Image (cartoon, helix red, strand yellow):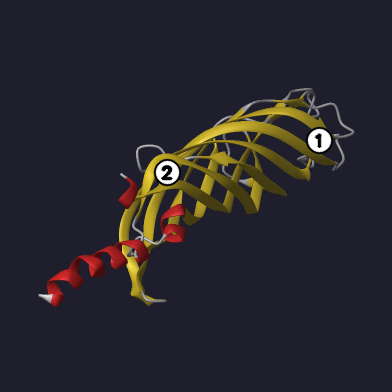
Amino acid sequence: MKNLFLIPILFLSLGLNAQHYVRTKHNFGITASYNFIDNTRLHNSNHAIEQGKYFAIGLTRVWKGFLYPEIFFSQHRGIIPTTFASEFTPSAYQLNGLGTGITAKIDLFTFDTKKKNGYCFARVLNLIVGGDYVYNFDINSNQNLKTLNEANGKIGLGMYSCWGGSAKNHQSWTIHWEGYYKYGFTPFLNIQNYSTDGSAQSFEHSAIGVTLRLMYHKTYRFSEM
């Protein structure tokens, strides 16, 4: 009989110590991207003629479990493209922009499954497909250039970690790493009288880069339902 009285106390004690946290639909995140290969190419050409640098930082969230809409600030730094026939001499530029985009992340398989700090742990590899539209509002250069708004598409692979159990920090935070190839479908820059015959020329971007996506998910304690 004494053991029967101890059973409810045992379950109550376990419930107080093992707090079960569950994610809600409310979340937000910070995203940062960097292109370690950032090419400028002629319009409708796949041949890179100049290299530059690019970074972007913004806000994101997860929607429907696999879609990540975002808004961001971006900056390109590079050299104004030149050709042997052009009268322009090479000149550095800095191009700022505001953009919006969306990325779909489709989980493919898990790997590196193991026990870590008393919890089950695994990494998830996913396919990423997305695009963005950037309003280029400012360019710092000593040449007379016309900036254009650009549309880009991207494809690549991503990875994030997942945990077993329901510890609050495991449920609240997720870190995503993404590697991508980005292709500019529309020009970002136009130069009038570019060629010796007086014709204009437009330029597009293509790049290989990485994105860090840090997500925070609001949680609630299951016992408080």
- Identify the residue at image location x=61%, y=49%: 33
Q: Nearer the viewer, residue 22 or 208?
A: 22
Relative vertical location of residue 110 with respect to residue 155 in this rendering, above or below: below
Left or right placement of residue 111 versus residue 215 in this view: left
| Kind of residue at badge 1 | Ser
In the picture, the quarter occupied by the N terminus is bottom left
Q: Is residue 67 visible?
A: no
Relative vertical location of residue 133 with respect to residue 77 in this rendering, above or below: above
Q: Nearer the viewer, mark 2 or mark 1?
A: 2
Q: Which mark is residue 86?
A: 1
Q: Are marks 2 and 1 in contact (CB under 8 Å)?
A: no
Q: Which mark is residue 129?
A: 2
Residue 116 locus on image (x, y percent) = 40, 76
Left or right placement of residue 90 versus residue 163 in this view: right
Q: Which mark is residue 74?
A: none
User: Residue 185 appears in which quarter of the rendering?
Assistant: top right
In the orientation shown, which residue stands out farthest toward the front?
Answer: 2
* SS at badge 1: loop
